[in-house]
Amino acid sequence: GAGIAGSSALNVAVCAALSEWARTHYEPEALLQVAMNVEAQTIRVPTGLQDYRPALYGGLAALELNVEGVRRVPLDVELSDLESRLVLCYTGEPRNSGTNNWEIMKKHIDGDRHVFDCFERIRDNAVAMRAALGGGDWNGVGRAITAEWENRKRLAPGVSTPVIDDLIARATRAGATAAKVCGAGGGGCLFCFGPPDRRDAVRNALAGGGARLLDFTIEHHGLIRG
């Protein structure tokens, strides 16, 4: 319920451990397919593509969704520079009480023009984010985060909540230049982005609003086999 793909990381780790125990070798992409299929059978809806790859590979990457398949493209970004601009917290509300990604996907499949428009804008924001990260344009990164969040909120009424809105307002007053929830929304974790010299002020503002601050590092290596 946190929205930070903890279940996907656990899934990848358990599938890898069981394959080692069974002495069955899977190449990374094959292991990813096993993990995806296990989760889809368990939750009884299709799964996404993105959550497993950071756990499997680590680092920062773009995913290119092409007709021939999914291609992971590592991005050359100094991870410590990105970490110094991020604050992560738990809002106090579990994400699974909020929106349902599958319901939104079904609306897209059924041709809902409003959802189509939101998806296309979010896609364009992802392209802008990739360019900004690759060019070291931190202002552009902030703009892309903000634009994505505005369009994600349009997908369904429950994506944001009064608690989330209050926390983002507090962080913005403290110097954050962008913020959004992790995952589908409706609760779970929130991250804020801003200048490194405002990070402590943003942390204090979030804590003052009742959020639980989470220490984190960006994973460099992903899954390490024994």
Image: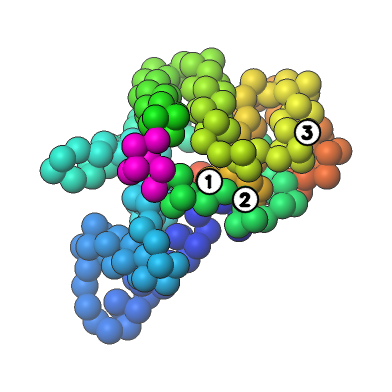
From what the image shows, is residue 48 above or below residue 37? above
Q: Which mark is residue 111?
A: none
Which residue is disc 1 drawn over?
183
From what the image shows, is residue 226 above or below residue 7? below
Q: CA distance from mark 1 to mark 3?
A: 19 Å
Marks 2 & 3, CB-CB < 8 Å contact: no
Q: What's the residue type where badge 1 is placed?
A: Gly
Residue 30, located in which quarter of the rendered image? bottom left
Q: CA distance from mark 2 to mark 3?
A: 17 Å
Question: What residue sits 32% from the left and 83% below the top?
Answer: 21
Which residue is disc 3 drawn over?
166
Q: Given this view, does label 2 or label 3 mark the residue nearer the observer?
A: 2
Q: Look at the image and say whether residue 49 sits in the magenta stretch.
A: no
Q: Quadrant of the N terminus?
A: bottom right
Q: What residue span does the magenta drawing correspond to?
A: 106-112
Label 1 vs 2, first from the N-terminus: 2
Measured as percent of width and height from the top left, residue 167 is found at 76, 35
Query: Circle 1 sits in a helix, a strand or a loop, which is it?
Result: loop
Which residue is disc 2 drawn over?
98
Q: Look at the image and say whether residue 111 sits in the magenta stretch.
A: yes
Who is closer to the viewer here, 27 or 186? 186
Query: Circle 2 sits in a helix, a strand or a loop, which is it?
Result: loop
Measured as percent of width and height from the top left, residue 189 is found at 64, 46
Question: What residue sits 41% from the left and 26% below the top?
Answer: 117
Q: CA distance from mark 1 to mark 2?
A: 11 Å
Q: What's the residue type where badge 2 is placed?
A: Gly
Horizontal placement of 209 versus 220: left or right?
right
